[in-house]
């Protein structure tokens, strides 16, 4: 099976709700492993495994929520990030935003 076929079959077998819940669970597991890693108690292999799980779930959600629309928003957000980086590094004039803490 191709990657897209696997995602389609997962949605067919388990349904949207269960796959969305799994995405939330995988995000939580990645969050936990990143926090452990930042606190010096982490295992890089666990972070990588959870990151892989999260990427798989994000790709499934992308398929469900219209890949073209998701890709459009990714392009927009990357362009915005690029602009912010240029402003922050002094390469471009612009409004410097203070990060919320």
Image (spheres, rainbow, N blue to C red):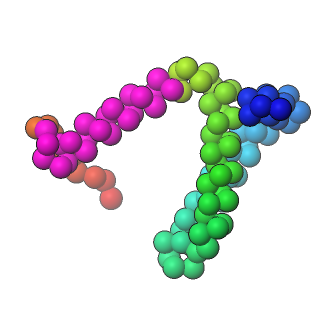
Name the outermost residue toward the right.
13
The single residue placed furthest to the front in the displayed view is 1
Please state the total of marks drawn on the protein image: 0
- Identified at 51% across, 26% down, the residue is 71
x then y, percent, for residue 6 = 80, 34
Q: Residue at x 67, y 59 (%)?
A: 49
Where residue 42 sits, quadrant-wise, is: bottom right
Comparing 24 with 44, the one in front is 44
Tell me if I can see residue 11 in this picture.
Answer: no
**Quick one: 67 or 26, which is closer to the camera?**
67
Q: Is residue 27 visible?
A: yes
Residue closer to the observer: 95 or 75: 75
- Measuring 66% from the left and 58% from the top, which residue is drawn there? 50
Residue found 42% across the figure and 28% down from its top: 75
Range drawn in magenta: 71-92
Residue 38 left/right relative to 49: left
Residue 39 vertical position relative to residue 29 in the rendered view, above or below: below
**What is the x, y in percent for residue 4?**
73, 29
Q: Position of residue 72 (x, y in %)?
A: 47, 23
Determine whether 90 is above or below 48 in the image: above
Q: Quadrant of the N terminus?
A: top right
What x and y, as percent, mark residue 41?
57, 79
Q: Main secondary structure of the magenta part?
A: helix
Assess whether residue 22 is covered by the magenta stretch. Answer: no
Q: Quadrant of residue 18?
A: top right
Horizontal relation, residue 101 to residue 97: left or right: right
Q: Could you tell whether 17 is left or right of 90 in the image?
A: right
Q: Indicate yes or no whether the magenta region holds residue 75.
A: yes
């Amino acid at each position: 099976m191709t990657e897209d076929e696997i995602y389609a079959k997962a949605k067919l077998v388990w349904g949207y709700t269960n796959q969305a819940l799994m995405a939330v669970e995988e995000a939580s597991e990645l969050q936990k492993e990143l926090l452990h890693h930042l606190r010096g108690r982490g295992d890089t292999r666990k972070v990588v495994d959870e990151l892989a799980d999260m990427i798989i779930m994000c790709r499934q959600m992308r398929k469900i929520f219209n890949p073209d629309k998701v890709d459009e928003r990714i392009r927009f957000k990357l362009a915005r990030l690029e602009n912010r980086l240029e402003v922050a590094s002094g390469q471009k004039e612009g409004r410097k935003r203070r990060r919320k803490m």
